[in-house]
Image (cartoon, rainbow, N blue to C red):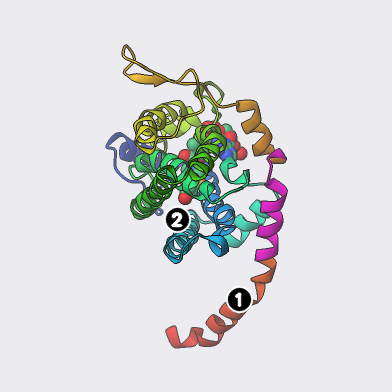
């Protein structure tokens, strides 16, 4: 006999309404949301590293200002998402411990190096483009705090994607060397961006349950396909070639046929064997240690002035 809480939860899902922190929810629902929101937040924080690598070497003050604004946005996205995770009764200090000890993940995409300035454009255009494709449906996720965090984040992501496209357009309209630099970046970022959407649906451990709980509105493969269909026309405007000889429009399907990313590589990168995993985690741990005094000072201050707010 189902408890009132379970019936109420089912009714919320059936009515496509939002589940809020105080509503009864199955433990599995809470656990998978903590897992996904925390890993999403970790991705935002780690994601600052590849691009930050180019802030001091941006080719103009304008590009430097744009890149700084984007990296700061990613930090803010991380904070919104840790705050959303905390509505589920977890503490961000513990989530960071789980990241630092490898018990929680961050997106595979940030384990690739940013070798040239064109990579900053390819990340904005492809990685933030993939992020938008994945995050727009999350604005309708069944869990209220996550969906609302996504609305704000998606607005800022479109600026991220536009500035990346604009940066690559400047290069493809530049010298032959600049055009070659843009093409080289697209060649290196295309397949890892496709892999960002996760394993194929048949190997997705959480996909079906997350769909049943209204967390995932579309499957990994559906979003990957949507990303390819959206990106091909943009590549034509940019004048860059997508590195996939089998990419072609399939009128029957109404979608592009394309070569799948290397999922064995995705698994290796997720397990820590990507080009930059060790560097990203070492940098993250060092930043956490170096920031300890700020956290201690903030809590000492809060302690000292707590009575004022009582
Ligand atoms: N990188 C790392 N791990 C990945 C992954 C990837 N690209 N894709 C899948 N995985 C992991 C999953 O976390 C899961 O492992 P876990 O059980 O330990 O968590 C396992 O591989 C199986 O994958 P599933 O498909 O079963 O997992 P999900 O149902 O969670 O789907 C997902 C994966 C599509 C990434 C989903 O978690 C999701 O939509 N997350 C929210 C979006 C997100 O995290 N985006 C990160 C990109 S960074 C970003 O958007 C910042 C922007 O500014 C660029």
Q: Nearer the viewer, residue 189 or 171?
A: 171
The one nearer the camera, 269 or 244, is 244
Element at label 1: helix
| Residue 105 image-quadrant placement | top right
- Name the residue at the top extreme: 252
Q: Dot 1, crowdedness within 10 Å: few (<14), some or many (≥20)? A: few
Specify whether residue 274 is painted magenta: yes
Residue at point 41% right, 26% down?
225
Q: Position of residue 236 (x, y in %)?
A: 36, 32
Instruction: Determine whether the beta carbon of the residue marked 2 sits less than 8 angstroms from the nearest atom of ligand 1.
Output: no
The N terminus lies in quadrant: top left
- In the image, residue 143 sits, relative to residue 295, either above or below, namely above
Rendered position, 292 above or below 278: below
Which stretch is magenta?
Answer: 273-287
Identify which residue is drawn at 42% across, 50% down.
167
- The image quadrant that residue 192 belongs to is top right
Image check: 67 left or right of 16? right
> Can residue 274 be spotted in the picture?
yes
Label 2 secondary element = helix
Label pair 1/2, CB-CB below 8 angstroms: no
Q: Earlier in the sequence, mark 1 or mark 2?
A: 2
Question: In the rendered structure, does residue 85 fall within the stretch colored magenta?
Answer: no
Q: Residue furthest front?
A: 175
Q: Which residue has dot 1 on it?
A: 294
Q: Position of residue 197 (x, y in %)?
A: 49, 34
In the picture, measured across the screen, residue 121 lies left or right of residue 157, that is: right
Residue under the point 59% across and 41% down: 108
């Amino acid at each position: 006999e189902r408890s009132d809480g379970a019936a109420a939860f089912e009714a919320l899902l059936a009515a496509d309404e939002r589940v809020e922190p105080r509503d009864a929810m199955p433990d599995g629902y809470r656990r998978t949301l903590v897992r996904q929101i925390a890993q999403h937040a970790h991705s935002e924080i780690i994601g600052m590293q590849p691009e930050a690598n180019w802030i001091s070497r941006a080719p103009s003050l304008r590009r430097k200002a744009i890149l700084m604004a984007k990296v700061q946005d990613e930090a803010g996205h991380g904070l919104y998402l840790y705050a959303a995770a905390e509505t589920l009764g977890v503490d961000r200090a513990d989530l960071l411990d789980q990241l630092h000890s490898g018990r929680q993940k961050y997106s595979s995409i940030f384990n690739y190096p940013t070798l040239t300035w064109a990579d900053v454009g390819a990340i904005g255009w492809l990685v933030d483009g993939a992020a938008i494709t994945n995050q727009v449906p999350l604005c309708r996720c069944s869990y209220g705090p996550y969906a609302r965090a996504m609305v704000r984040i998606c607005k800022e992501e479109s600026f991220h994607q536009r500035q990346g496209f604009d940066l690559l357009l400047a290069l493809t309209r530049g010298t032959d060397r600049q055009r070659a630099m843009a093409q080289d970046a697209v060649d290196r970022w295309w397949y890892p961006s496709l892999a960002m959407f996760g394993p194929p649906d048949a190997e997705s451990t959480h996909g079906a349950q997350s769909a049943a709980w209204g967390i995932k509105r579309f499957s990994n493969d559906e979003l990957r396909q949507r990303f390819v269909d959206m990106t091909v026309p943009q590549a034509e405007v940019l004048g860059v070639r997508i590195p996939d000889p089998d990419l072609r429009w399939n009128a029957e399907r109404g979608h592009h046929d394309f070569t799948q990313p290397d999922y064995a590589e995705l698994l290796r990168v997720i397990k820590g064997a990507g080009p930059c995993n060790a560097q990203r985690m070492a940098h993250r741990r060092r930043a956490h240690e170096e920031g300890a005094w700020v956290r201690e000072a903030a809590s000492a201050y809060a302690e000292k002035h707590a009575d004022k707010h009582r």
